Amino acid sequence: MDAEFDSTSSSGRVQRAVALIAISLVVILIASVVYLRPSLSAARSSTAGDARYRVAAVDFVSRNVGWVVAEIGDGGVVMLHTTDGGATWARQLTVSADVHPQYVKFFDDRVGVFALVGTRPNLLRTDDGGETWTRLPALAPDATVISWSFVNDTYGWMLARLTKSAGAARLYRTGDGGRTWDDLGVPVPAPAQAYQVHFSYVTTGWLTTSGPSPVAYKSVDFGATWTPVALPAKDGGWPATGQFFVGVQPTTGVGAVASVVYFPPIRGRTGVGGTIRSFPPLTVRAFDGGRPFTYLYSTVLDRLVPNGRSGSPPPNEAILSTVDNGATWSASSNLPSGGALGYFDASHWWWIGVGALKRSDDGGLTWGHVQEANNMYPLSGLLQVLDAKHAWLAADNGSKPLLQRTDDGLHWSTVRLPALGLSMP
């Protein structure tokens, strides 16, 4: 059947120069989604990759069965599927997404969901491994999704605003795979703001928020209520005033990582302090030389999720980790900068750099020595570790989109992606 999204959204594009000078760019985009029957059946991996598209998401359910989301040159998104470890690929879905981030999650080799962030709440669901997709609309046409989270093919959560104007985000829950949604209300009290929702179990979830206190918000009742969880202070105590960004990303099971960033209150136009505007990316409004500027920062969370970004780290970011569902938190030490992060359980983490691998056995708190590896330049947020030996990595050799895989945890082989047409049908 056909599925289609209609949306209108705007997003800022600002980069901070070394001398703290930034340029603001606002782009207003109109996107629609169109479902297509598979049109790239069993394309051989020997086909030359197309330099004008990039990998936006990697989702494998086993060492051989998985999906890749590729962004092509004219703003389209193509989903590719392999059942033989990348030897052949089938084109399963083509959507017009402009620059909207994507959410993709497969629960086994048959059932999965795909959606866009920043558009009308529409979910695409497949029950046959991506051969066909069903469109599942939700909420009003003028609502905007800012975050999706599914833990299985039945239970999922959606953080959305009812209009495209600014306002507090509301949380919605489905218990039937996205066919119907229950309104759970605004999850955090003002002036705190919620930007993302992540569930690790059906009952247990975390929010990414900004607000006046350095607390993480956790739910243990399917998202119905949220309780602030105190986080240990860095260097003797948290400041009493200002704004805190607290981003929490579950890893697997009872594991989670938190990024805590503090900005002092703005006092006049001196350039001291800042106001958190949105996430992702972490967007902060401040003054530079008496003029207002918007700065974008890259937190550790950006290196964990698809569509993550790399860039200047925020000032004084505290990285905390838990392996007991938030009962205790510890500060991460010697976390490698740059590269890509991944994990296969709460304790075992990988960091991949250019030709380098590091491992952590305690949830990212401490890291072992650097091991040489033959991988190419890793793309942030696109490392998927399946177990102690098997992982997939989206890489860049400067000219073509590539995947790399390892079957021993150290040696990487290159998997070429098929060429894709650049024009949307």
Image (spheres, grey):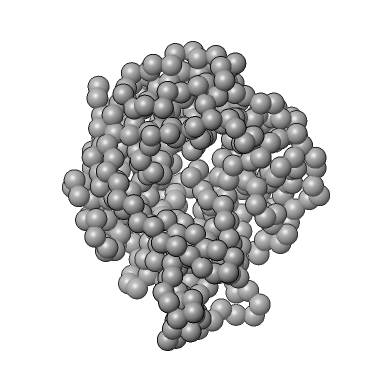
Q: Nearer the viewer, residue 117 or 201?
A: 117
Q: Is residue 236 left or right of residue 285?
A: right
* x then y, percent, for residue 15: 49, 59
Could you tell me which residue is drawn at 54 percent across and 58 percent down? 298
In the picture, the quarter occupied by the N terminus is top left
The vertical placement of 51 against 318, above or below, is: above
Could you tell me which residue is drawn at 40 percent across and 22 percent down? 92
* x then y, percent, for residue 350: 68, 44
Snapshot quadrant of residue 218: bottom left
Q: Nearer the viewer, residue 210 or 23?
A: 23
* x then y, percent, for residue 227: 42, 65
In the rendered image, is residue 286 in sight?
Answer: yes
In the rendered image, is residue 348 in sight?
Answer: no
Could you tell me which residue is drawn at 29 percent across and 33 percent down? 33
Q: Nearer the viewer, residue 209 or 232?
A: 209
Could you tell me which residue is drawn at 43 percent across and 16 percent down? 40
